[in-house]
Amino acid sequence: MKKALSFLSLFLTICIFAEEPFTFYVAADPHVGYFQAIDNEAANRATIDDMNALVGTPAPWNDKEEISKPRGLLIAGDLTNSGKSTEWIGTFSKYGFYSLFAAKGDGLLTIPVYEGYGNHDIEGGYPGVLLAIYFRNRCRQTPIHKSSNGLHYSWDWNGVHFVNLNLYPGRSGPAHNSLTFLKEDLKNNLHHPKQPIILYHHYDYQDSEAWWTQREREEAYKAMKEYNIIAIFVGHNHLSYQQEWNGIDVYALPSTYEGKYSVCHIKENTLFICHREKGEWLDMWQKEFFRPT
């Protein structure tokens, strides 16, 4: 029996880490409800149309390959402009975040969405976005691990562990104990101590301490430094760039209402991050990472 169990454990480990390549999208800051000079709804819908149309087109990381249907879209905060219910649900004449970016891919965007809240979703004092994320977390397309308050969550795609930390990895206040969840999740939900991990949250590591303090950042680094963090995606500043924070690669995400997002592809031990803007391919980053075998 012990030999049989050992063989089963080895088989499961091989299945977990010898996975097929997969694609996913990352974006930030839809700011649904913000009617700037360019109509917000029309701009977000144009970005969604571009996302939907990419499947089957030549892949930017290898023009001999085609982009397969993505596993989902990660959104790093500021889903709405002020957290109002009309911005989430929409009105008779306008789409809300719910219809544009439905959790199960049955909205205008035809792939599942894994969103986190940003400062604009909570600064107005409206609880609607937090409640919506809580209930969306009860019926995600992919099985997830949830925090005790139901806001933060993690899951696995093809041997890679994803963690949504919403605003930023912090303790009390607007972070709603996301750092506690991060510690517990990495301790309890990894299949291997060196399983590759992708984190995402709203605040950027270049932000001033007015947004989140240096002490909080140090605590976050202490919680993750022993793990195989292959990328952190952030929003907030509506810019696209790569930076290094304590040896960890951080990728800033621009805004969907400006027609911008990134297409990510993982093949074996390589992560490709391809920035797209208004239907054109721009920057591409390639990241090699350790993957248990």
Image: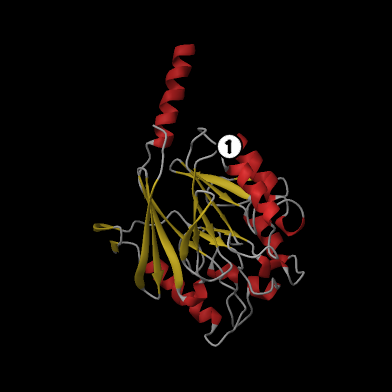
Question: What coloring was used for the rendering?
Answer: secondary structure
Kindly identify the residue that appears in the image at 61 percent across and 49 percent down. Answer: 153
Q: Can you say whether 218 is above or below 113 in the image? A: above
Residue nearest the viewer, comparing 139 with 15: 15
Quadrant in the rendering for residue 23:
bottom left
Q: Is residue 134 left or right of residue 35?
A: right
Q: Is residue 223 visible?
A: yes
Q: Which residue is mark 1?
A: 189
> At which x and y percent is residue 143?
55, 45
Q: Can you say whether 24 is above or below 86 in the image? A: above
- As helix, strand or loop, the secondary structure at mark 1 comes to loop
Q: Is residue 126 left or right of residue 115?
A: right
Image quarter where the C terminus lies is: top left
Residue nearest the viewer, comparing 135 with 154: 154
Q: Is residue 1 left or right of residue 219?
A: left
Residue nearest the viewer, comparing 104 with 48: 48
Residue nearest the viewer, comparing 82 with 281: 281
Kindly identify the residue that appears in the image at 67 percent across and 67 percent down. Answer: 119
> At which x and y percent is residue 122?
71, 67
> At which x and y percent is residue 24?
43, 56
Kindly identify the residue that appears in the image at 75 percent across and 65 percent down. Answer: 127
Q: Is residue 276 left or right of residue 122?
A: left
Q: Given the image, on which type of amino acid does mark 1 rest? A: Asn
Q: Is residue 147 visible?
A: no
Q: Residues within 10 Å of mark 1 (few under 14, many from 20)?
A: some
Quadrant in the rendering for residue 10:
top left
Q: Can you say whether 231 is above or below 77 in the image? A: above
> At which x and y percent is residue 187?
61, 35
Q: Can you say whether 192 is above or below 8 in the image? A: below
Q: Residue furthest bottom?
A: 37
How many marks do you count on the picture? 1
